[in-house]
Amino acid sequence: MSGNGAITRRSFAAGALLAGLSGNALAQGFAGLGESAGGFEAVVPGRAFSFPADHGPHPAFRIEWWYVTANLVDSGGTAYGAQWTLFRQAVAAGAPQQGWANQQIWMGHAAVTRADTHRYAQTFARGGIGQAGVEASPFHAWIDAWEMRGRDAIDDNNIAPLELSAAGADFSYALRLDAEHPLVLQGDGGYSRKSLREQASYYYSQPYYQVKGSIVIDDKPADVSGQAWLDREWSSQPLAADQSGWDWLSLHLAAGDKLMLYRMRQTDGQHYGSGKWFARDGSTQQLASADITMTPQAFTDIEGRKIPTAWRIAIPKLAFAIDCTPLNPRSWMGTSFPYWEGPIHFGGSHTGLGYLEMTGY
């Protein structure tokens, strides 16, 4: 609410989102994502992906996101991270309604990270009134003035080039993302299981972006370049009721390979893991839960939470064993549904950079 007690459209949207995920929903894993998804479309194996259509929204499903993380460096060698995320959440099933009756709530998160600081911002919008949305072709995702927009020469199979921009009270960035390699499907042809039961998402990525642009922190600009990773996921129930959250990594190996890993934390301690290796020659290898060991090595106390910010990752069948260290262990997103998200570097059998996300702590 504003200082005079008037309800703004942003606070109304935020309140509607929280109301839609209140009560029992908030008890169902991180952000209520383990809540029953009755009435929404189910994720099933064998989907035929179609681009550019699948770059756009899927309102028959309950939740989806357009998610970019970037590992960047300036001309003096200072490392940065940047995050841009647009979430769509349906608070009720059914055909999309017009105007203020629309069931879609949009939420944007943006952040920049440096070793000595982490800045983030959050914004909300109600669907149906043009304040936020995604258009598949020509590609354009936005919430208020934050944008991810395809350039005129965009290749729908690469979803590049893109221009990315966002701003908070004390930071901003404007980045251009280019890619020469096509998108990759996660899981089994884009069907990504999240448990041994029916929980799953449709999931594809663009892990091959090369980035140039600028970051401004406290009115001080820096020209930056580096690598970025786009994740696109949509689902109706990505968590089981006994899963509290996840630990997810996207890794850019120095040799040019890419690796995605996640661990869905279960209350009985029998965590469900998955991953996929994308080799330089274009081959891929799916990784099962039994293939992956993720072991916390150090913790950071943040807002009364004990967050595992350093990890040892082992995949014996790939002779892969690394230790991951955060650029800034206090990369906490103190948003409506708080989580940890920040850039990392790693060494051991392989070296490189990446991003770590941890929810539900």
Image: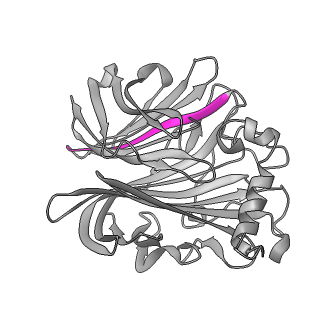
Residue 44 can be seen, yes or no: yes
Q: Residue at x 59, y 61 (%)?
A: 54
Q: Residue at x 47, y 19 (%)?
A: 290
Q: Quadrant of the N terminus?
A: bottom right
Provide residue 229's location: percent of width, then percent of height: 39, 54
Is 152 situated left or right of 352 in this image? right
Is 91 situated left or right of 228 in this image? right
Q: Quadrant of residue 249?
A: top left
| Image position of 53 with respect to 131: above or below | above
| Image position of 265 with respect to 354: above or below | above
95 magenta-colored:
no
| Image position of 270 with respect to 232: above or below | above
Q: Quadrant of the C terminus?
A: top right
251 magenta-colored:
yes
| Image position of 242 with respect to 220: above or below | above
Q: Quadrant of residue 177?
A: bottom left
Q: Nearer the viewer, residue 250 or 23?
A: 23
Provide residue 231's location: percent of width, then percent of height: 49, 53
Provide residue 108's location: percent of width, then percent of height: 57, 63
Residue ranking furthest to the left: 76
Residue ranking furthest to the bottom: 152
Magenta segment, which residues?
Answer: 243-254
Q: Residue at x 45, y 63 (%)?
A: 157
Provide residue 332's location: percent of width, then percent of height: 47, 47
Q: Nearer the viewer, residue 170 or 195?
A: 170
Q: Main secondary structure of the magenta part?
A: strand
Q: Residue at x 64, y 25 (%)?
A: 196
